[in-house]
Amino acid sequence: MSEENDGGEIKHKLIEIKQKWARDGRLLTGAPDVAQAQRLPPGQKEVKTWPVLDLGVQPDIEKESWRLTIDGLVEAPAALSYAQFLALRQTENVSDIHCVTQWSRYDNHWTGVTSRELIALVRPKAEARHVIFHSHDAYTTNVTLEVFGGDDVIVAHQWEGEALMRQHGGPVRIVIPRRYFWKSAKWVKRIEFARDDKPGFWEVRGYHNEGDPWQEERYG
């Protein structure tokens, strides 16, 4: 994440706190292997609001200057402007959010481009196995290509019928409902397809590489 004089101290303090959570196994219930059919994963509590969680840095990106680069091991790399992104087939879907800090929010309405649409656009090469998300605040996180290609994954620009707010990752963010929400990168600017895995910001700081909420994969 980028260094900013007004947010650097806050950022480092929060990073240290969350790294300690990982070392101590904070919030773990010891109840993995809960059936996938159960809507609320173990250790989670339903909330009605959408808490804002960041490290004191919220990039301010104008839609006119936003670009999404999709590259790496693909046959047809793309660099999409916001207008070009909106010109792709748009999809609406509904999914739940599960944050590693123990809250879940049900029935979030998203509008955007499905991951499968983007996969079809760039055509990953046979050796591509992983997907790395890069954000405007230098944040990165990783999932397998199989996870990214899930039928409920969307690259979203709207939430509840309105433009995605800056504090929640606007203008465009990743939404992967079947993983803890730190995997759903805010302020996304690049989607990289790779042969080898590249653990991201939280993954190298003690968080689980997979992040499945129903298996309570909070920490690695």
Image: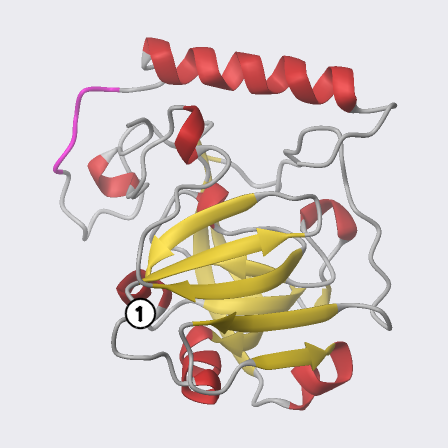
Image coords of residue 35 (percent x, y): 13, 45
In the rendered view, tell whether residue 156 sits above or below residue 16.
below
In the rendered view, tell whether residue 136 sits above or below residue 172.
above
Say which residue appears at 12% left-offset and 37% top-offset.
33
> For this view, does 134 lie left or right of residue 209?
right
In magenta, the rendered stretch is 29-33
Secondary element at tag 1? loop
Q: For residue 32: magenta?
A: yes
Residue kind at label 1, given as amino acid type = Ala
Residue 172 figure quarter: bottom right
Say which residue appears at 20% left-offset and 38% top-offset.
215
In which quadrant will I find the N terminus?
A: top right
Q: Which residue is mark 1?
A: 128
Front-lying residue, 50 or 185: 185
Image coords of residue 154 (percent x, y): 49, 69
Visible residue check, residue 102: no
Say which residue appears at 59% left-offset and 63% top-offset.
190
> For this view, does 175 lie left or right of residue 88?
left
In which quadrant will I find the C terminus?
A: top left
User: Predominant secondary structure in magenta?
Assistant: loop
Say which residue appears at 72% left-offset and 71% top-offset.
67
In the rendered view, tell whether residue 192 sits above or below residue 89.
above
